[in-house]
Every structure is written in C-alpha cells, then in structure tokens.
C-alpha cells in the first residue's frame, strides 16, 4: 500500500542563492521536492531536483516565491509521470546477503522490490541514472519486516566495486536505480536489465525522467536489446579538411554544449572558456557556438588540406605556420648516394630536348624537398592557412586552454544536439589523436572579424601573471555548514590549482576547511562554478563537465562571468575568492527573469 495523498497545506520553503543566476528551494522532504519540481516544470521553470531540494535557474525571486505559494505539499503517489516497466533478472551478487541482513528471503526481497511502482525522483552522477523512491507500509501476500516498511534505509556496501556493469539494478539508502553504463559504485546489486537506460539518438535521451513511475518485473531470462548504432561520422572532403599532426596533451571538439538536460543527468558541458571560444568563432566569420578545438597546454599541430581560415584565442601562446615542402631549385653540396645515382640510359632512347650530361643528371637526382622558413601569425586575429601548411601552437606563457576556430566550423555528428565532448558523461567525439582528419563545414558566407582595437597595433608581449586570480563568488548555499574560521580562511587564503584538475573540476590545494555540521548532506543540484568541499576539506570548483547533483556541501558559487577565469587557471596558479552580494551583481544574458528557457 502506497503512502497517503498530498495535503492542501503549503509548507514553508526556504530559498537560498546559487551564484548570480539560480535559487535552491529547500522542500519539506523528498516527496515534496519531486512535487515542486514537477509543478514548476509545468510553469516553465527549469532546474534539477535533489533528495529534498530543487535548484531552479532564475534570478526573479518574487516570481518563484509566487509560484511556490500555489504548490501544496507533495506526495510521491500523486506524480502524473509516464508508466514504464523494466524486465529484471534477479541474480545480483548482493541479493541473498542483503535479504538475510533485512530479515527476509531472497524471494521476499524480490516481491517487495516489484510490488508497486517506484517514482523517478532526481538525476544522479551519469546520464540516465535516476534515483527512484517510494513508501510502502504493506505488500499483499508478503509479511514485511520492519526493515522494509515505509522508506527503508538500505546500507551501501562497505567496499565499493571498481566497476558495476551497465544495466545493474541496485538499492542504496531509500532509493532504487539502474546503472546506465559501467562505473564504480557501492550500491547493493539485486539483478540486471537489458533495456538501455539511455539512447543517444533520441532527445531526450534518457528512458526515465523525474516523475515517471517505474515498475520492475521479475523474469527468468532477459531478451538482449541491441544498443542504437553510433551516429555516422561526418564525411571528410579530401580537398578541404584539417589533419591533426600532433594532438598534444588533450585536444577536444567543443561548442556550446547541451544546456537544459540536467534533470536527466546531463550537464551543459561545452567550451570551458566560453568567451574565448565565441571570440574565435567570430574572428573567422562563424556564429558563436560553432564547433571548434579546445587544446590544453598547447602542443597542437594542424595541417591544412585546401585553403583554410583560422583564429586562435584563449591562453597566451606563440603560433607558427610552417609552409608546405616545395622542390629545391638549388643543387645540394652532397654527392649522390647509390640510391640517388642516375640510372644509365642510352641517349638514343631519349629525345634530344631531354638529353642531359651525366653531371647535370646527377644534380637533378639529388634535389630534395625544401621547407621555407615559416611565419608567426598573431593570436586573436584571423589568418590564412594555405593548402599543405601546418599550424603549430606553442605552450602557453599564461593560461591553460587554447581555442582554434576554422571558418565553417568542425563538422561532427551531433549527439543530443551538440558536437561537444563531455568527459564525465562520455558523450560526444573522442579526444583527438595524431593523424585524425577533421571535416570542415560549409563556408558561412560572412565576413571575418578584424578587431579594430588591435588592427595595426604592435604585437603585445605576454607577461607572466602577477598575484592570484581574483574570482568573485556568492557564498552558499551551504556556507552555514562551515565554521566561521573556515569561511574566513576560504576568502583570505590563496588557493593553488592542483595538477589533478580537469574539465570536471579545478581541485584546490591549501588549508583545509572545517565543517560545523558533520552529517551527510542529501544529494542536491549543482551548477558550473559550484565550490564543493568533500571530506578532505579541500575545495573543488566544478567546471562545465560537472555532475548535476552532489552530496558534499557547496560553500560558494563562482559568478557566471568569472567561470572563464577558472577555465584558464593552470596547475600551480593561485586563486583568491572575493565574496559579493548576489543582489548587486548583474545576471548573465543566459539567465531569464521568469520561467527559464534552459537549465544548467
């Protein structure tokens, strides 16, 4: 028997600022959070749910408060989502041991798990991973132990697995979920399903969405379902493309990413330094958001097949264009080797106009390709890369990520509406490798952008950074989980960016931050720029490939306008956080004042 229906009572729900563009709603409980998320979604607000919170992207607090005042306390039983059934083979590694620990037989645990639908509540660490919950006081024909009544807390494994197979059906806490892909995990495994939880050829791609009602059906055998085929790669024009001669440390294809899908576990992703990527696009005449290359710490070399127009922005780097090899018209000083020696030919077999003396033929045979000296284009300006020429990108003197745009853009198949590589979710093209050929899109038919402020100006010499990066933040939403001394230390000390940083987050080194609240934080939504403090006490600044929910308190969030600074913070760079009042900051142009068109 499911829980009772919702009441008409409207509970008090606290609103907490998240950066300069979002608000976190504290709900009465999980059921209320699911109901609030569903009701706000119907009104056009977009965001991501949590275990007892809902994160909404809006800067219009009065409009959100007015909407919340009309939403009564929710119930899981009242969710109007789709009815979805999953066939499950209950042969999980933890089934029997878990059943014994709960005081029930394995068949009894299966009967409890399949008795009534589970409600998809909120997204987890991966696309398609939905935390599903319900409340049962009794099951017809089954004697439930106290450990399974209501919303039981199922303990996680004491030793997490390094790899949980895709399709595993599992329990942990008060939730049930299906692992959409192989990943580490500490949940208790009950069984497996062959139904794909994510189809990258569909949009939305996830089988489940918040509010859906999921019923597990026990079967003896599961029918294998072939996964959808990967999208066909773009056709490369032999006469017009780019060749990756050297990929460097990491080179990825990026665009504006996949906003608006965090409720099913997909972060926005896309270029980390968005302003630099958009500037590169405009310089070559592309629309902002056109796919380009994002290179970490330089070392990238690209050869043009056909004439191309490129621009490089982002970190401060030296550029060099190496011309294509050309035949040497000057004789070499070296004597011909045996392999180079002229072949003996009867002069009678050669027309008179083609006959040469032996010494002259020897000179011709020793001619070798010669590479003329290259030239150095300026970063931040468009330039031509002629057929056969190679662009070499040096190591940054300041910054971390370089963006290379080509006129027409990099042509890659869209995955869920984007060609961006999401390193956490495993979406989009793989990282580039030496020898890859990149298809170039159609000429946009627009003019290149020659910045007036730099046209004809002397070449600026890069200068080493002096002092820490100053990054503006809004404290919270969980700053009250830290001691006053920790809050002071967070703002006063200079943090160093750790070498273990990546596109998911910039890890910081410094003095540990002590918490005033030690209990576990129920999972709640995060945004790019959320500064999460894990058990180590050392902050992690989430970047655009971040998980959409997290279980560690967020002490502050970076202003959206300052995210590009963190994207360019190389390992060893120092950072100081400057707390500002969200009421005095200007929201970004992506933020809408009422119901939002996209979420994080």
Image (cartoon, rainbow, N blue to C red):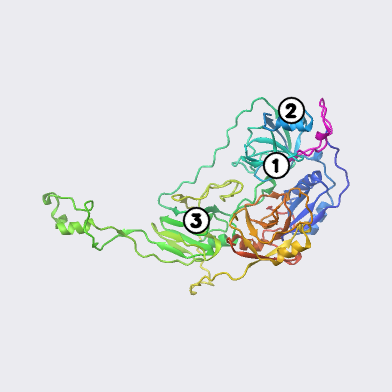
Residue 207 at x, y percent in the picture = 66, 39
In this rendering, the label closer to the viewer, 1 or 3 = 1
Q: In the rendered image, which residue does mark 1 sit on?
A: 130
User: Magenta region, mostly helix, strand or loop?
Assistant: loop
Task: Kindly tell me whether residue 248 is visible in this rendering.
Answer: yes
Horizontal relation, residue 259 to residue 380: left or right: right
Q: Which region shows up in magenta?
A: 130-154
Residues at marks 1 and 2 touching, judged by CB atoms closer than 8 Å:
no
Give the label on residue 39, or none.
Answer: none
Q: Is residue 290 located in the magenta-colored stretch of the structure?
A: no
From the viewer's side, name the closer residue of 397 and 316: 397
Residue nearer the viewer, 539 or 134? 539
User: Which image quarter: residue 372?
Assistant: bottom left
Q: Name the residue under label 3.
A: 408
Q: Which residue is drawn at 40% across and 51% down?
A: 239
Position in image of residue 533 (x %, y %): 70, 55
Q: Residue at x 51, y 42 (%)?
A: 232
Compute the Cα span from label 1 to label 2. 24 Å
Label 3 vs 2, first from the N-terminus: 2
> Which numbered disc flags the more N-terminal residue, 1 or 3?
1
Instruction: Check disc 2 and report the residue beneath it.
Output: 106
Judge the density around disc 2: few (<14), some (14-19), many (≥20) Cα neighbours within 10 Å: some
Q: Distance between the residues labelled 3 and 2?
A: 59 Å
Q: Residue furthest left?
A: 348
Decide: is 500 above or below 126.
below
Inter-mark Cα distance, 1 to 3: 38 Å
Left or right: 512, with 303 as reference point: right
> Which element is circle 3 on?
loop
């Amino acid at each position: 028997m499911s829980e009772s229906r919702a009441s008409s009572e409207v509970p008090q729900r606290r609103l907490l600022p998240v950066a300069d563009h979002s608000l976190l709603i504290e709900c009465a409980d999980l059921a209320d959070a699911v109901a609030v998320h569903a009701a706000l979604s119907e009104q056009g607000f977009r965001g991501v749910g949590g275990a007892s919170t809902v994160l909404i992207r809006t800067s219009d607090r009065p409009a959100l408060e007015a909407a919340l005042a009309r939403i009564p306390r929710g119930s899981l039983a009242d969710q109007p989502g789709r009815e979805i059934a999953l066939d499950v083979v209950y042969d999980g590694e933890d089934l029997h041991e878990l059943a014994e620990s709960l005081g029930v037989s394995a068949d009894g645990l299966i009967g409890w798990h399949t008795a009534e639908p589970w409600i998809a509540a909120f997204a987890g660490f991966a696309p398609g991973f939905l935390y599903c919950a319900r409340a049962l006081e009794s099951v017809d024909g089954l004697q439930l132990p106290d450990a399974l009544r209501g919303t039981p807390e199922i303990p996680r494994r004491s030793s997490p697995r390094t790899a949980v197979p895709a399709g595993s059906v599992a329990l942990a806490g008060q939730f049930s979920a299906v692992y959409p892909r192989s990943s580490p995990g500490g949940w208790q495994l009950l069984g497996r399903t062959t139904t794909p939880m994510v189809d990258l050829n569909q949009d939305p791609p996830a089988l489940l969405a918040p509010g859906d009602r999921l019923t597990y059906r026990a079967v003896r055998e599961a029918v294998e379902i072939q996964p959808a085929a990967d999208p066909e790669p773009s056709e490369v024009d032999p006469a017009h493309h780019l060749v990756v001669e050297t990929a460097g440390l990491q080179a990825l294809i990026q665009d504006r990413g996949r906003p608006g899908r965090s409720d099913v576990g997909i972060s926005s992703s896309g270029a980390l330094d968005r302003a630099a990527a958009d500037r590169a696009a405009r310089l070559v005449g592309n629309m902002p958001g056109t796919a380009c290359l994002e290179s970490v710490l330089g070392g990238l070399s690209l050869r043009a097949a056909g004439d191309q127009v490129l621009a490089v922005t982002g970190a401060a780097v030296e550029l060099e264009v190496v011309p294509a090899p050309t035949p040497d018209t000057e004789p070499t000083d070296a004597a011909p080797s045996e392999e180079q020696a002229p072949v003996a030919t009867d002069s009678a077999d050669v027309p008179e106009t083609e006959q040469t003396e032996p010494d002259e033929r020897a000179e011709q045979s020793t001619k070798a390709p010669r590479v003329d000296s290259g030239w150095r284009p300026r970063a931040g300006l468009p330039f031509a890369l002629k057929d056969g020429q190679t662009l070499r990108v040096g190591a940054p003197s300041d910054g971390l990520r370089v963006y290379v745009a080509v006129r027409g853009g990099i042509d890659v198949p869209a995955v869920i509406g984007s060609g961006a590589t999401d390193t956490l979710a495993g979406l989009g093209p793989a990282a580039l490798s030496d020898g890859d050929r990149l298809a170039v899109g159609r000429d946009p038919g627009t003019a290149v952008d020659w910045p007036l402020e730099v046209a004809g100006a002397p070449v600026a010499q890069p200068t080493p950074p002096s002092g820490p990066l100053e990054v503006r933040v809004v404290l919270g939403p969980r700053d009250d989980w830290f001691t006053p001394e920790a809050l002071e230390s967070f703002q006063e000390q200079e943090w160093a960016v750790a070498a273990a940083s990546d596109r998911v987050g910039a890890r910081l080194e410094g003095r540990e931050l002590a918490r005033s609240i030690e209990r576990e934080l129920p999972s709640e939504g995060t945004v790019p720029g959320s500064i999460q403090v894990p058990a180590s006490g050392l902050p992690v600044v989430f970047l655009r490939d971040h998980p959409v929910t997290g279980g560690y308190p967020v002490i502050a969030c970076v202003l959206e306008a300052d995210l590009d600074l963190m994207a360019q913070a190389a390992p060893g760079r120092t950072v100081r956080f400057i707390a500002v009042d969200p009421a005095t900051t200007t929201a970004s142009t992506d933020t809408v004042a009422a119901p939002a068109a996209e979420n994080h």
